[in-house]
Image (tube, coloured by chain):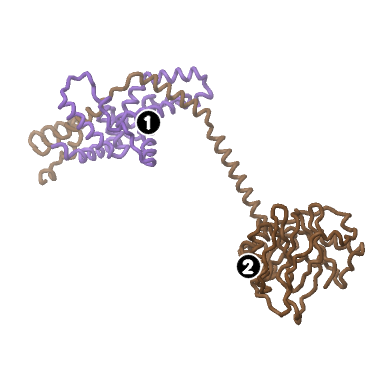
């Protein structure tokens, strides 16, 4: 180590001395003759040089030139067919479309169904004969004792906002469209919520038109002192047996009865369950008419009396009706 | 792009001429850099693809061979980057004898095996060098280019080439040190 430390030619022996300046090369050669350490280093470097030459011997494969030209030309044609610019443009277009659809879907509440505007129906202005009340109501027997319904059994309420969107709450409170989580919590069961979301379709405008026409026809006197049309009662349309069983269980529990579930052919029929009370009002279904593709529900309403005794209403008034695509409510009087 | 401004047949003829004159040298350089035949072929293809696309853009300010060497170095660096990303190794990487050895040499089996061991050793040590150092060692100590030529290829000064070469040799000697005694 001492020799290596003080040998000033040691670092230069990394390369062959023929690359050095003539004078420096001459001095190095003279030094190497007397320095065993530098002799060893020089021998090592010459060995490395020999090994590098061995490594560098390459015999190109036969027909290399033709193969290169063929590969390059074929790759060139492939590159021409595949245009990255077009692919990038297509990807950008698809991305923009997806973003647009996403934003569009966010701007509209997806959990609510907006009812289409109903066409004008002049024939509905005529008085409906009693014979056309096709389906009698399946009324649960009324108990005579007074009983207060628990909050969880209170039926779902349909609220129509100013924009015409239906919203649901179990306690009759208005729910803003920006609060889907609250909406979910409000309904007592997920299944009931699912039904309400899917099946609610009514139009207050059409309802008021119909009421006006029926009043004009003398079918029922207008409600005194109420110029502003109130909303229809909340209701459920049940199209599955399991959902009917749940509602029926609520009915039985409220009346402390164990009546069997009515037989319904859900292939052609459905069950209409109108809430008896909601938002401080008591609703009574007078009749249910089936017209073409519309189900017309005539009802009356009255405020719930706090000192009311002698009867305990079930949460729903249940009717089995043939399936219709629309449902309309018409208020015909007050209790 | 050559094919957009030059007739296809003409550009192909020019490409064939360049491949005929420089193809073997570029292949040898690519093989010395990559250490195996498959990667060498890929590098050569990439180099001449680049040449084919930019024949019109070659202004003649530098020699064609200098340009080709620079493109080869860049293509090899790209290959190294892809390898690092994909982390796969060519199956033919350790089969150099078909190309490195000259079958006409009358060498016996023992000497042949010893030589292969040395070649594998040098290859493995060269692979441990940084790409630029390996390129300089190959150009200077294997292909025996002058400092000026290497400086033109690397677009730097000859003095820079000398200092980098000294550093690369030192690095290589350290790697080979255990096998030199």
Q: SS for tag 1?
A: helix
Q: Does residue B17 appear in this view?
A: yes
Number of marks in the rendered image: 2
The location of residue A103, given as percent across then percent down, is 63, 52
Other residues around mark 1 within 10 Å, as few (<14) / some (14–19) / many (≥20): some
Identify the chain of the residue marked 2, using the numbered disc in the image. Answer: A
The location of residue A129, given as percent across then percent down, is 88, 60
Q: Quadrant of residue A331?
A: bottom right
Q: SS for tag 2?
A: loop
Which residue is more in the foreground, A315 or B62?
A: A315
Q: Which mark is residue A7?
A: none
Q: Which residue is mark 2?
A: A188
Residue at horizontal 92 percent and vertical 62 percent from the top = A217
The location of residue B62, given as percent across then percent down, is 39, 26
Q: Does residue B33 appear in this view?
A: no
Residue at horizontal 80 percent and vertical 54 percent from the top = A118
Identify the chain of the residue marked 1, using the numbered disc in the image. Answer: B
Which residue is more in the foreground, A294 or B103?
A: A294
Q: In brown, which chain?
A: A
Specify whether disc 1 shares its chain with disc 2. Answer: no
Other residues around mark 2 within 10 Å, as few (<14) / some (14–19) / many (≥20): some
Q: Colour of chain B?
A: purple
The location of residue B112, given as percent across then percent down, is 18, 26
Residue B48 lies, with reference to residue A170, above or below; the image says above
Q: Which residue is mark 1?
A: B70
Question: Which residue appears farthest toward the bottom when viewing the image?
Answer: A307
Which residue is more in the foreground, B59 or A332?
A: A332
């Amino acid at each position: 180590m001492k020799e290596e430390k003080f040998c000033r030619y040691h670092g230069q022996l990394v390369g062959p001395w023929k690359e050095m300046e003539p004078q420096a090369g001459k001095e190095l050669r003279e030094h190497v003759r007397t320095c065993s350490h530098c002799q060893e280093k020089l021998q090592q470097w010459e060995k490395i040089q020999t090994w590098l030459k061995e490594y560098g011997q390459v015999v190109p494969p036969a027909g290399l030139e033709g193969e290169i030209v063929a590969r390059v030309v074929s790759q060139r044609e492939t590159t021409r067919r595949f245009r990255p610019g077009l692919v990038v443009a297509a990807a950008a277009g698809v991305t923009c479309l997806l973003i647009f659809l996403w934003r569009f879907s966010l701007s509209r509440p997806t959990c609510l169904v907006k009812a289409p505007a109903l066409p004008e129906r002049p024939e509905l202005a005529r008085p409906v004969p009693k014979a056309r009340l096709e389906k009698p109501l399946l009324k649960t027997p009324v108990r005579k004792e007074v009983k207060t319904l628990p909050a969880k059994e209170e039926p779902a309420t349909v609220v129509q906002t100013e924009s015409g969107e239906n919203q649901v709450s179990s306690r009759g409170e208005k729910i803003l469209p920006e609060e889907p989580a609250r909406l979910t919590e409000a309904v007592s069961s997920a299944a009931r919520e699912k039904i309400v979301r899917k099946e609610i379709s009514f139009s207050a405008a059409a309802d008021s038109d119909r009421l006006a026409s029926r009043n004009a026809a003398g079918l029922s006197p207008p409600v005194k002192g109420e110029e502003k049309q109130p909303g229809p009662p909340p209701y459920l349309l049940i199209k599955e047996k399991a959902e009917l069983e749940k509602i029926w269980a609520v009915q039985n529990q409220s009346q402390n009865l164990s009546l069997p579930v009515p037989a319904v052919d859900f292939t052609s029929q459905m069950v209409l369950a109108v809430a008896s009370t909601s938002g401080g009002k008591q609703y009574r279904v007078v009749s249910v008419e089936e017209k073409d593709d519309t189900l017309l529900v005539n009802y009356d309403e009255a405020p719930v009396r706090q000192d009311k005794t002698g009867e305990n209403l079930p949460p729903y008034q249940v009717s089995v009706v043939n399936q219709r695509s629309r449902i309309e409510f018409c208020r015909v009087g007050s209790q | 792009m050559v094919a957009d401004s030059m007739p296809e047949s003409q550009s192909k003829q020019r490409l064939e001429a360049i491949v005929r004159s420089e193809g073997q040298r570029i292949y040898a350089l690519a093989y010395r850099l990559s250490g195996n035949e498959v990667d060498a072929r890929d590098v050569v293809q990439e180099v001449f693809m680049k040449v084919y696309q930019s024949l019109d853009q070659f202004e003649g300010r530098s020699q064609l061979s200098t340009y080709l060497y620079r493109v080869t170095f860049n293509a090899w660096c790209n290959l190294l980057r892809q390898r690092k990303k994909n982390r796969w190794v060519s199956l033919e990487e350790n089969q150099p004898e078909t190309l490195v050895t000259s079958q006409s040499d009358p060498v016996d089996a023992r000497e042949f095996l010893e030589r292969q061991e040395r070649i594998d050793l040098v290859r493995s040590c060269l692979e441990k060098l940084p790409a630029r150092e390996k390129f300089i060692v190959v150009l200077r100590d294997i292909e025996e280019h002058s400092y000026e030529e290497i400086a033109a290829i690397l677009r730097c000064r000859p003095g820079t080439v000398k200092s980098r070469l000294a550093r690369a040799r030192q690095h290589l000697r350290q790697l080979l040190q255990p096998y030199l005694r």
